[in-house]
Image (spheres, rainbow, N blue to C red):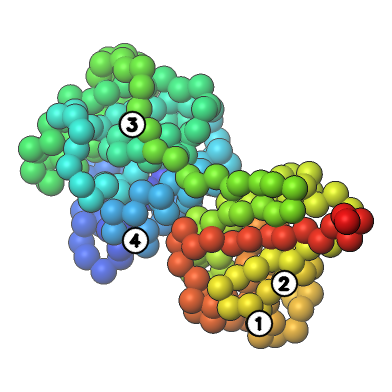
Amino acid sequence: MAILTLTTDWGLRDHYLASFKGGILTMISSLQLVDISHEVEKFNIMQAAFILRNSYKKFPPGTIHFIGVSKIDNHTTDKPYVIVKTNGQYLVGEDSGIFSLILDKDDKQIIRLSFQTNTDRQQLLNDFVTIINKLATGTELTDLGEADGALEDSYFATPTVDHMAIRGAIIYIDSFGNAVVNIERDLFLKEKKDRSFTIFFRKSAYNVSTISNAYEEVEVGEMVALFNQDGFLEIALNKGSAAQLLGLKIMEPIRIEFHDYSAG
């Protein structure tokens, strides 16, 4: 049974998602649909990319991932829609920079679809349903469009490092108000060595100097820093919203300073 995942900024209140699913199931009723998220902020390709980057590889080989999130500015090509095959998976959507965010330097096969940017919304969705049906029933990629060698580039912010600090940025805030920082566990351990440290936020009263293994290692209402299941530094408030308490926003800087007491 073929699997199709859906990640969109369409929300759940309107009929758009149900209509799209209905069209898919009418063509291929045996398809297994999995909703990854439909609460992506409107036109926020970085948020959608973070969600998919940390979930799509968990699915079985051959899974099709539909991305219904467009960028807010104009298309840079008259054929902006693609299928990308990578890591045994198929990703389908607009080449807005989101694929380079999700896949980084992973090997990939790119097929550019013939859909035009001036196609009305309903026709565009019908075209996607047709493409998904062909993918799910084994049509060769090369029969679905033109081979292409490149995707639109886009990049997550990367941390900077010196002897005494790592400077990163918040790249995602989840529904609990936990802030994910672009500092990964391996980088932190490499730079920390045997030194103590302090993680600095906008509000200095809430700075953290310990990495925990679970939210519950601190009292309810206290700040906690840990590395989440995807290996990223996460700033949280036990049973509360760190983003709300600290006023944290996407791309806000976070600084880890190391205390090298042997210096000087």
| Most foreground residue, 260 or 65 | 260
Q: In the image, is 170 to the left or to the right of 14?
A: right
- Pick the front one: 5 or 159: 159
Which marked residue is nearer to the observer: mark 2 or mark 1? 1
- Nearer the observer: mark 3 or 1; the answer is 1
- Above-or-below relation of 139 to 213: above
Q: Distance between the residues labelled 4 and 2?
A: 29 Å
Q: Where is residue 157 in the image (x, y as percent from the top left)?
A: 50, 47
For residue 221, side relative to residue 250 (left or right): right
Q: Name the residue under label 1.
A: 205
Residue identified by numbered label 2? 208
Looking at the image, tell me whether mark 3 or mark 2 is earlier in sequence order.
Answer: 3
Residue at numbered disc 3: 152
Q: Which amino acid does label 2 sit on?
A: Val
Residue 96, placed above or below residue 231:
above
Assign a secondary structure to mark 4.
Answer: loop
Residue 58 pos. (x, y %): 58, 42
Q: Nearer the viewer, mark 4 or mark 1?
A: 1
Quadrant location, the C terminus:
bottom right
Q: Kindly identify the residue that appears in the image at 19 percent across and 37 percent down.
A: 75
Amino acid type of the residue that numbered disc 1 sits on in the rendered structure: Ala
Label 4 vs label 3, nearer the camera: 3
| Residue type beneath disc 4 | Glu
Q: State yes or no: discs 2 and 1 in contact (Cβ < 8 Å).
A: no
Mark pair 4, 3: CA separation:
21 Å
Task: Give how far apart the Cα atoms at labels 2 and 1 are.
Answer: 9 Å
Q: Mark 4 points at which residue?
A: 41
Mark 3, mark 2: which one is toward the viewer?
Answer: 2
